Image: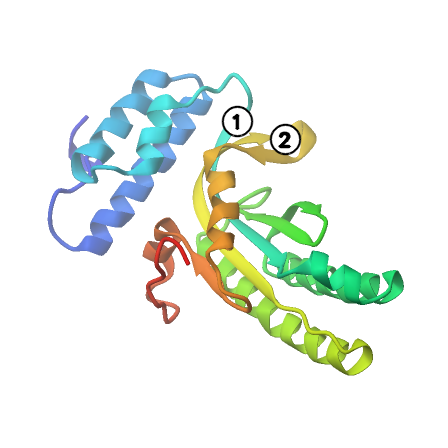
Amino acid sequence: MDGPDTAPHDGDPEIQRASIEALIDRAVAALNTGDRATAAELADQILATDRGNTDAEDLLAASTNIGEIRRLTMLVADLVDSTALSTRIGPDAYHSVVGGFREQAQRIIAEHGGHIGGTAGDGIFAVFGHPVAHMDDARRAVRVALDICGHVARISEQARRRYGVEISVRIGIHRGLVYLDVAHDDVYGLAANLAARVSGLAPPGAVVVSTAVESLVRNDFDLVEQPASI
């Protein structure tokens, strides 16, 4: 392909990034309609400009046999040392503290257009971009994460006064291609696993975003580079 369908090789980095984003979206749409040739051609164009682009590499390897492919922003929030917490306070107190965290987190996610993809134990998995997509889904996810951290700090202060314990949350955000199982309201794939791994890099009370998210939100938030392991 040529003309407007070709990603630029030089010029303004923001324009180049926007062009690559558009090509990825077109490739995803083509793949979901069964047009693997077009999807592969678009992915090759992206890799010619942005070598190592994980979304393009995933497109080349993807199969639509197990679900629809979507590019989503995923947020994983986990309470820190919750198992130890459960041994220090009674079941009612634990339910009150963890329930308060879940209630506030789910409210904030819904208010910013996110969707709860699952809860397990003391963790929450949320997606932005399904069932309704927004141009600023990555920014919404970061804002949600910061708001959740603020609310958990207040819940922790209440728990310290009432039960003599404190809590904190770590949150990770990643954006990438996943398989969307609409029938079961579930997503799976490497990108979903990476979101959980990113959350594991976050210090207590902090938010960590992947490189894929950083490129979309760096003009909206103050970011500090985080080492790959802590």
Circle 2 crowding by C-alpha within 10 Å: few under 14, some 14–19, many from 20: few
Place of residue 218 in the rendered image (x, y in percent of width and height, measured from the top left): 34, 63
The alpha-carbon separation of the residues under discs 2 and 1 comes to 8 Å
Place of residue 149 in the rendered image (x, y in percent of width and height, measured from the top left): 58, 69
Q: Is 176 above or below relative to 88?
A: above
Q: Residue furthest left?
A: 10
* Depth check, front residue: 125 or 205: 205
Place of residue 208 in the rendered image (x, y in percent of width and height, measured from the top left): 45, 59
Q: Residue at x 82, y 67 (%)?
A: 89
Q: Which residue is mark 2?
A: 182
Question: Which quarter of the figure is the N terminus placed in?
Answer: top left
The answer to whether residue 89 shows anywhere in this view is yes
The mark nearer the N terminus, 2 or 1, is 1
What is the total number of numbered labels drawn onto the structure image?
A: 2
Q: Amino acid at mark 2?
A: Val
Q: Residue at x 32, y 41 (%)?
A: 22
In what element is the residue under mark 2?
helix
Say left or right for 101 vs 64: right
Q: Is 155 above or below relative to 19?
A: below
Q: Amino acid at mark 1?
A: Glu
The answer to whether residue 99 shows anywhere in this view is no
In contact (CB < 8 Å): disc 2 and disc 1: yes
Q: Is 78 above or below relative to 25?
A: below
Q: Which residue is mark 1?
A: 68
Q: Residue at x 65, y 72 (%)?
A: 151
Say left or right for 96 vs 43: right
* Depth check, front residue: 170 or 147: 170
